[in-house]
Image: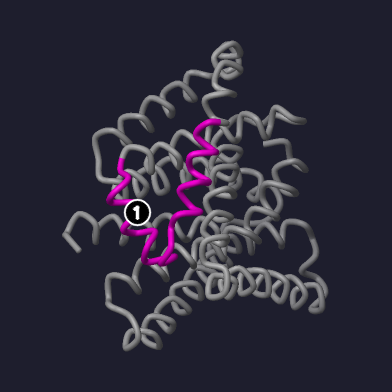
Amino acid sequence: MDLLTLISIGLIIIIGLPHGALDGSVFISLNLDKNIWNILLFITLYVLLASLVAFSWFYFPQVSLIFFLLISIFHFGIGDFQWTTGFDKYLYGFLNGGIIILGISYFNFDTVNNVYKYLSINTDLVWKFHNFANIVFLILLPFFITNIDKLRTVDFFRIFLSILLIILLPPIVAFAIYFCFIHTYNHFSRIVPVLKKQMNSKKIIYTFSIFTIFSWLIGFIVYKYFISSFGAEELIYRILFIGLAALTVPHMILIDFYFRPKNRI
């Protein structure tokens, strides 16, 4: 594993991963933290969902990887696009998120396939999904172009930057830059101002820190436990992406299907 890859993975862990740690503050903002049973229920459901996704990888690796790619497309696409409703939300979400997720894989087949093999020994079904998703993307692209007037200047800039990242940089580097400096920035810039209206900054930072440190601690424990069973590089990729998949599911449900619609952000 070269230095640039290590730096990229470090950025994902230190900057990208913690953006989901705001979920604790989001829960508190709903005024559900007054009852200890609500807190325990939230934590239990969050951990249960994340664990379910993680354990599914051991039994259905290809399906789990495809599921992760699909939700990543919609999470990036919906999360990094301006607020919209109805069918447009998912249409723009697929097209917007597909640029980075499908684009990285399309332009870097060999490198991405090597990473996929760490996550799922057999990748045939995964690439069939990619081929199908690419076709759907191309079919829907004219809709995106004919409605280009709905895009803001920042949307054009993000799409242009995403294409440059995909074409010019190694896949893990491109993903790290997008995830850390575009997606994470968009998330913080939307969520934090809303949270500040409902709680003080110290409480946000305190909750954010607890969730972040807990996530890092779990990752470290898993690494120490499995290091004797996997090579270091394979284990790092497995913890990184299976961990991201596990956390994305409860995070996406809370943010994309509840908090953002509720606050229209």
Task: Point out residue 29 in the picture as x, y percentages from the top left corner.
Answer: 72, 56
Q: Amino acid at mark 1?
A: Asn
Residue at the (79%, 61%) spot, across then down? 31
Q: Is residue 21 visible?
A: no
Viewer-proximal residue among 122 and 166: 122
Query: What segment is highlighted magenta in the picture?
Result: 108-135
Q: Residues within 10 Å of mark 1 (few under 14, many from 20)?
A: some
* Viewport quadrant of the N terminus: bottom left
Q: Name the spot of residue 38 as percent of width and height, x first.
A: 80, 72
Quadrant position of the C terminus in the picture:
top right
Q: Tell me, yes or no, whether the highlighted magenta stretch contains residue 109.
A: yes
Q: Position of residue 66 (x, y in %)?
A: 54, 54
- SS assignment at label 1: helix
Residue indicated by mark 1: 113
Taking the magenta stretch, the answer to whether it contains residue 120 is: yes
Residue 174 sits in quarter: top left
The quarter holding residue 225 reads bottom left
Q: Residue at x 43, y 57 (%)?
A: 123
**74 to 27, vertically: above or below:** above
Q: 28 or 161: nearer the eye?
A: 161
Judge by depth and name the residue closer to the eye, 161 or 64: 64
- Whether residue 125 is situated above or below residue 147 in the rendered picture: below
Residue under the point 24% across and 57% down:
5
Residue 183, position as x, y percentages in the image: 48, 43
Q: Is residue 37 left or right of residue 29?
A: right
